[in-house]
Amino acid sequence: MVASMRHALQANTWWGLPGGGAVDVFYVYLDNVDHRRRQLEWEIQADLDLGPLGQFRDFPNDATVDEDLIPPQSLTRLTARQVNLLAALTCWVVRRSQPAIETFLTPPISA
């Protein structure tokens, strides 16, 4: 669910960027985690089991447009329960990934 990668910077003539060099990026991808899901209250687990029929229909990968489908073509507006569940998962992932995050953020010791 987490990974760090070094990417080569490409030239971008549109923006006048020369490219060259590299950038380090730390990726965090949120997805369902069975171990975490079993830690949730049974009511939330039951609602998650409903899939598209429940209040957490696309959790944790909510659409950026039309998640609630009312009104059509609207930006997503999550409920307080959806936001709290997403925040709790994010917190859990960050805490579980603390060693990898600390390694990424710690500058190398130069000789």
Image (cartoon, rainbow, N blue to C red):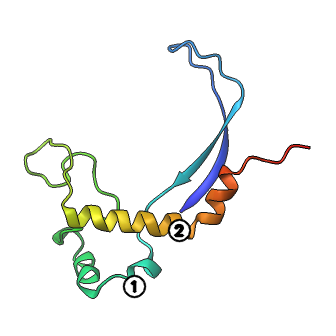
Q: In the rendering, at what x and y percent does residue 49 appear?
A: 27, 79
Disc assigned to residue 95: 2
Residue with the mark numbered 1: 38
Disc assigned to residue 111: none
- In this view, the residue in front, 58 or 39, is 39
Q: Amino acid at mark 2?
A: Arg
Q: Is residue 64 visible?
A: yes
Name the secondary structure under disc 2: helix
Residue drawn at 15 percent across, 55 percent down: 68
Q: Amino acid at mark 1?
A: Arg
Q: Please, is residue 35 above or below residue 52 in the view?
A: below
Residue drawn at 65 percent across, 61 percent down: 100
Name the secondary structure under disc 1: loop
Q: Please, is residue 19 above or below residue 76 in the view?
A: above
Furthest-bottom residue in this view: 42
Neighbour tally class for label 1: few under 14, some 14-19, many 20 plus, Cα within 10 Å:
few
Residue drawn at 15 percent across, 43 percent down: 74
Q: Using residue 102 as the reference point, say whether residue 14 is left or right of it.
A: left
